[in-house]
Image (cartoon, rainbow, N blue to C red):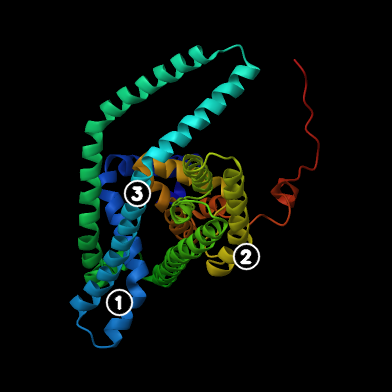
């Protein structure tokens, strides 16, 4: 029936559908984001689940064991961060001394190039410090709510993962019943490709976190940079956020280095090592691990990250790229939304579409100035 509608009506319906989808994500993000996270983790655990099923392991146990592996991994990450934060707390007097020295050096430099003296600068810094303290006090109540939300999020994940793996056949039957029988081969192909993309992408990211932590943390440790492993892990995790995460990782690496050293050369060293590791990651290692599975152009990858962040915070930023990749798989296999798949992809036409014969005009258009 929609095929008989005018083109403008079709495009209006598509845009309205996208707006409704975003609205649903914003309103129901506290419910939807744990489900999406559990869905992606379930896809990643499928190979281990199938391996256990082939070994005649009972289905419930074949689901619980992979979940325990994930829980163990998360527990190790939490232990590592708590240990590193403990080291930072023990170094707090030295960090305070280093920060004071850096502020004094910055103050002297500002005094040399501007007309502001030390007293004006101290008054400005004191005022901003009071503002930050007031902001921190106002946010303290919200922090408890945020932490409780995180614990609920983490607590729901294993339940959702278990139920998704246990009822996966019901979910697949629902998807097939949603489409005509003639379209089932395309649906099956889309399901297999979606599973392949998600698995290769998420497993590739885990491998990326591992080798970036070893490379970056190991090189910084050999050079003698303090908190080298913490810098490596933080940068490796933030690097999962496309484009934006690398900048945040650089800033945090610089700040951690400044607080642990009174000299400037460690900061330059950290930035150079991060740039070297990023070059290896972007041009040699990551393309061989993930390959060209996720073919999303940079424009919509960045837009997806910002939109995901505005909708669901950090979790939305992490999940933005796999969600956009799944949408592209769906769009590419539907006639109605094929143009959206082209828009999200990175396959540039061999020549400009304006050079196609259908776009050429036989006669020039004469315009008259009024």
Local packing at callout 2 (Cα closer than 10 Å; few below 14, some 14-19, many 20+) is few
Q: Residue at x 30, y 58 (%)?
A: 79
Q: Earlier in the sequence, mark 3 or mark 2?
A: 3
Give SS at disc 1.
Answer: helix
Q: Earlier in the sequence, mark 3 or mark 1?
A: 1
Residue highlighted by disc 3: 85
Foreground mark, 1 or 2, reads: 2
For the residue pair 239 and 87, the one nearer the viewer reads as 87
| For residue 356, above or below residue 142 | below
Q: Residue furthest bottom?
A: 55
| For residue 110, above or below residue 321 | above
Q: CA distance from mark 1 to mark 2?
A: 31 Å
Give the x, y percent position of residue 302.
52, 45
Q: As drawn, is 149 to the left or to the right of 261?
A: left
Q: Residue at x 50, y 58 (%)?
A: 217
Residue highlighted by disc 2: 284
Give the x, y percent position of residue 109.
61, 23
Residue highlighted by disc 1: 49
Q: Is residue 330 visible?
A: yes
Q: CA distance from mark 3 to mark 2?
A: 33 Å
Query: Quadrant location of the C terminus?
Result: top right
Foreground mark, 3 or 2, reads: 3
Give the x, y percent position of residue 211.
50, 65
Q: CA distance from mark 3 to mark 1?
A: 35 Å
Give the x, y percent position of residue 333.
48, 62
């Amino acid at each position: 029936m929609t095929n008989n509608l005018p083109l403008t009506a079709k495009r209006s319906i598509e845009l309205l559908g996208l707006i409704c989808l975003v609205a649903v994500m914003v309103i129901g993000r506290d419910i939807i984001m744990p489900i999406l996270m559990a869905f992606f983790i379930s896809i990643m655990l499928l190979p281990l689940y199938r391996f256990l099923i082939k070994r005649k392991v009972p289905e419930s146990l074949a689901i619980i064991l992979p979940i325990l592996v994930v829980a163990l991994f998360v527990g190790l990450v939490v232990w590592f961060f708590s240990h590193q934060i403990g080291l930072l707390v023990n170094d707090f007097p030295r960090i305070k001394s280093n920060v004071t020295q850096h502020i004094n050096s910055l103050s002297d430099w500002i005094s040399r190039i501007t007309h502001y003296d030390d007293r004006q600068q101290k008054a400005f810094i004191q005022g901003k410090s009071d503002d930050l303290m007031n902001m921190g006090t106002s946010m303290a109540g919200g922090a408890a709510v945020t932490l409780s939300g995180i614990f609920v999020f983490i607590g729901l994940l294993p339940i959702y993962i278990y139920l998704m793996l246990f009822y996966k056949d019901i979910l697949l039957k629902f998807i097939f019943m949603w489409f005509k029988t003639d379209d089932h081969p395309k649906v099956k192909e889309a399901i297999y490709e979606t599973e392949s993309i998600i698995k290769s992408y998420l497993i590739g990211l885990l491998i990326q976190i591992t080798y970036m932590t070893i490379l970056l943390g190991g090189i910084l440790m050999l050079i003698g940079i303090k908190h080298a492993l913490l810098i490596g892990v933080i940068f490796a995790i933030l690097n999962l956020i496309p484009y934006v995460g690398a900048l945040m990782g650089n800033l945090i690496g610089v700040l951690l280095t400044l607080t642990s050293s009174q000299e400037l050369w460690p900061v330059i060293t950290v930035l150079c090592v991060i740039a070297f590791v990023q070059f290896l990651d972007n041009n040699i290692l990551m393309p061989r691990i993930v390959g060209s599975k996720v073919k999303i152009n940079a424009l919509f990858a960045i837009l997806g990250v910002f939109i995901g962040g505005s909708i669901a915070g950090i979790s939305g930023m992490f999940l933005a790229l796999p969600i956009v990749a799944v949408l592209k798989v769906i769009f590419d296999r539907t006639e109605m939304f094929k143009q959206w798949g082209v828009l999200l992809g990175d396959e540039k036409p061999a020549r400009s579409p304006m050079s196609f014969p259908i776009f050429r005009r036989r006669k020039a258009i004469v315009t008259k100035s009024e």
